[in-house]
Image (spheres, grey):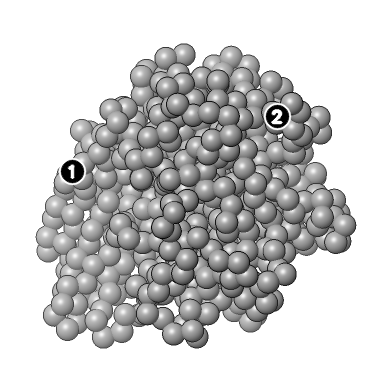
Amino acid sequence: MTPHQATSYPDFGLTPDERRFAVRGHYYETPGMDGGRGEIWCYSDRFSYRPGDVVRLQVSATASSFSIRIERDGARLTKVFERHGLKCHWQDTPDQCSVEGCGWETSFELTVGADWPSGAYRMTLTAAGRGGAEIACQHLIIVASQPGGRPGRVLQVAATGTWLAYNTWGGSNAYQGITGHGRDQYARMVSTQRPWCRGFVTLPADAPRVPVEISVPPRTVPRYPHMEWALATGHSKKYASAGWASYDGHFFRWAERAGYAIDLASQHELHFSPEILAGYDCVVFVGHDEYWTWEMRDAVDRYVEQGGHAARFAGNFMWQTRLEDEGRRQVCYKYRARAEDPVYQTGDVTRATNSWEAPEIGRPGALTFGLNATRGVYAGWGGCAPRGARGFPVYRPEHWAFAGTGIYYGDLLGADGHVFGYEVDGLDYEIRGGLPHATADSGAPDGLQILALGLASQVEESADIPLEDQFLSDEDGRFTAETLFGEASDENLERVKRGNGMIVNFGRGRGEVFHVGSCEWVAGLLQRDAMVEKVTANVLERFLRA
Ligand SMILES: [Fe+2]
């Protein structure tokens, strides 16, 4: 924390009522929202493609023609395609498009060039608005590489399951929605067949991240600058929770600029084509990475067993999802899984779309990545450790990951970049002789070392925060209490509410896992925090060499 840090929240010109709506209200992208100005929207038939594949773009616009520019978003922004005068028209959108998909007809097809390097490709569509001013939208596709040997290259798997769960376009996501009789329920199924919400592809540099950057005075009612900014500027309420712009893109660009040869894939490929991992010495996962399928975990577990190296610089390994309709629909009943997910009655309950730590699933996240979501959770926002660690308190500075950083026992790693938050993953632990050890019943893999450890909370501390001002409250804590121990009692809440976030390392089979269990690690790369860059480089270099 800098000595001159502000002690009041930034202000984006909203009234108190608007500020409340920004946090409590439900606002989202929907056709017709821009009224007289007109609109253009676009989605593609898939999230990712390989060279030679045909990309089908579905466009709906108030204009009759549009232009498209496609740029690869890597170390440099490189234009690869541009076309003008393409035909489009306004297409009807079903009310429940977030769940069912938009169902628009294809407006334009293009073939991914054989010479397009793997990466993220930003599409910008522009057209004439009704009043003459330009209207625009953005879309993003991933170009993966062809399977085969890729020695010396890193594969980053984008957290597209989480992007999809948070996508606000059309009114429903895995958090809020317009489903159910009262049109007030979150979506238990979300479709890939809809545009990305505003702020998932690009963001201005001054868009706030979730962790609060002020020194919070005592007994302060929490505010949420990212949601206030979203409402004030017309961005998605969830822009800071998921997406290429807030998370995955920062890592990819940093890695290319630092000289690493890096490819990109989507989680859909991990699910449907697990063989994509085989040729890589190092696979990375980044950012807010909350939704996984059983098959994706199988792919990573097998890869590591057989000698692969997985580095996860990401937090919140929370929910099991199922993919249906050839991957176009992602299912996650979440809090209602035990009541409503049909696998509890008629199917294989290990595939329940519940927390990975639900005992009936029998596959806690720690079995793959060493840490669990419900032992971690919130840090640095709301009433959850708002004056907390900011960086990772380091316990084992002699570990290879810290070589050349100059970091010592008790130092904070990444505090300048505020890498600790806003959701972290942890384990039950005990301190012996000043060093943390995973407890015997923590579920930690054999040989796991805890390198760094900071505190988090699953429950908003409520003594100074009136109920109507609590955003996080104890809802998640009660859910975890019930999921793990059968009942959402005060006693069980007490057992789950104190969390932590860790950096851990362990070997499995012939391979190895390194895991920084925090969403915000990329914020340290973005800030060019030297210690965060060095640790990241140490991990990539060891894994590429091994
Ligand atoms: Fe999350």
Q: Which of these two is toward me, 93 or 67?
A: 67
- Secondary structure category for the residue under label 2: loop
Of residues 207 and 81, the one nearer the viewer is 207
Residue in the foreground of this view, choosing between 389 and 351: 389
Along the line of sight, which residue is nearer the eye, 159 or 180?
159
**Residue 461 rendering spot, x and y as whole percentages:** 69, 63
Q: Is residue 136 above or below residue 423?
A: below
Q: CA distance from mark 2 to mark 1?
A: 50 Å
Q: Is residue 497 left or right of residue 258?
A: right
- Comes first in the chain, label 2 or label 1: 1
Amino acid type, callout 2: Gly
The residue located at (71%, 22%) in the rendering is 446
Furthest residue in direction front, as rendered: 3
Q: Residue at x 43, y 59 (%)?
A: 5
The answer to whether residue 51 is visible is yes
Q: Is residue 83 left or right of residue 125?
A: left
The answer to whether residue 501 is above or below residue 164 is above
- Residue 442 sits in which quadrant? top right
Residue 485 x, y percent position in the rendering: 85, 51
Q: Residues within 10 Å of mark 2 (few under 14, many from 20)?
A: few
Q: Position of residue 54 (x, y in %)?
A: 29, 45
The residue drawn where x is 14% and y is 52% is 82
- The residue singled out by tag 2 in the image is 434
At label 1, counting other C-alpha atoms closer than 10 Å, the crowd grade (few under 14, some 14-19, many 20 or more) is few
Q: Amino acid at mark 1?
A: Thr
Question: Could you say which disc has been placed on residue 78 in the image?
Answer: 1
Query: Nearer the viewer's eye, disc 2 or disc 1?
Result: 2
Number of numbered callouts drawn: 2
